[in-house]
Amino acid sequence: GAGVSQTPSNKVTEKGKYVELRCDPISGHTALYWYRQSLGQGPEFLIYFQGTGAADDSGLPNDRFFAVRPEGSVSTLKIQRTERGDSAVYLCASSTTPGLAHEQFFGPGTRLTVL
Amino acid sequence: DQQVKQNSPSLSVQEGRISILNCDYTNSMFDYFLWYKKYPAEGPTFLISISSIKDKNEDGRFTVFLNKSAKHLSLHIVPSQPGDSAVYFCAVRSGGAQKLVFGQGTRLTINP
């Protein structure tokens, strides 16, 4: 079946602009995660959804970042007033009902470049 | 404050030999440990995991070892194959949280 898909694959924007990044999880997966990977680093957790609600948003760096998952499937990560430091690969992952021993399946990511 | 460290940014191994990738963590509350593999332009792919109640888990050519007293995790790949060339991330989780905390990654190159 289809894996996690993310659009766009690349996004170039100017400092100060608003961007939206989309994630389509694997069908039937109730849990959805956003991570950010900067150059030379591992993925860094941003937010976790269980169904429609954000169960853990402790990784969002500031109030310019916001994510939604209104119908419990597709999610959108929104970044306002982008800064050059926001440049990174934004990864989305999904999993079945979470438990200790579950696997998170990752999408290919969206590479965001803020000029 | 890095909770999970992979101190070797890169590793080069001859095809057929054993590859050993290492990971250290600081928080004894972590109770589930995973290894992910990442090819360029792709997302990380789950490889193998281990619970804190075990000290070894094996899956084909891949074995993960956990030393809780040393807070150390390692991944052994034997025999190494050219297709194993990728960046490997260790990741940890504590029981109450769903988020994964990743190390910085180790780039493994298998030479023919």
Image (cartoon, grey):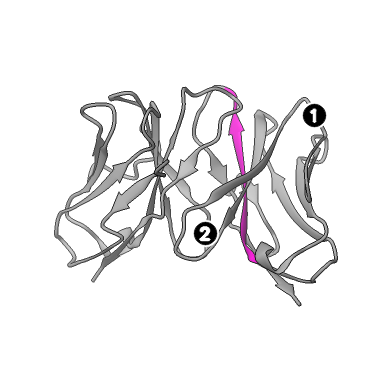
Above or below: residue B41 compared with residue B53:
below
Q: Position of residue B5 (x, y in %)?
A: 65, 52
Q: Say which residue appears at 36% left-offset and 38% top-offset.
A: A25
Residue B1 makes an appearance in the image: no
| Classed neighbour count for the residue bearing mark 1: other residues with Cα under 10 Å, few (<14), some (14–19), many (≥20) | few
Residue position marked by numbered label 1 in the rendering = B54
- Residue B92, given in percent of the width and then of the height, sits at 61, 38
Q: Quadrant of residue A32?
A: top left
Instruction: Compare residues B111 and B25 and report the one nearer the observer.
Output: B111
The answer to whether residue B100 is above or below residue A5 is: above
In this rendering, the answer to whether B109 lies above or below A32 is below
Q: Amino acid at mark 1?
A: Lys
- Provide the residue designation for mark 2: A41
SS for tag 2?
loop
* Residue A3 in sight in this render: yes
Q: Residues within 10 Å of mark 2 (few under 14, many from 20)?
A: some
Query: Which kind of residue does numbered mark 2 sit on?
Result: Gln
- The magenta span reads B85-95
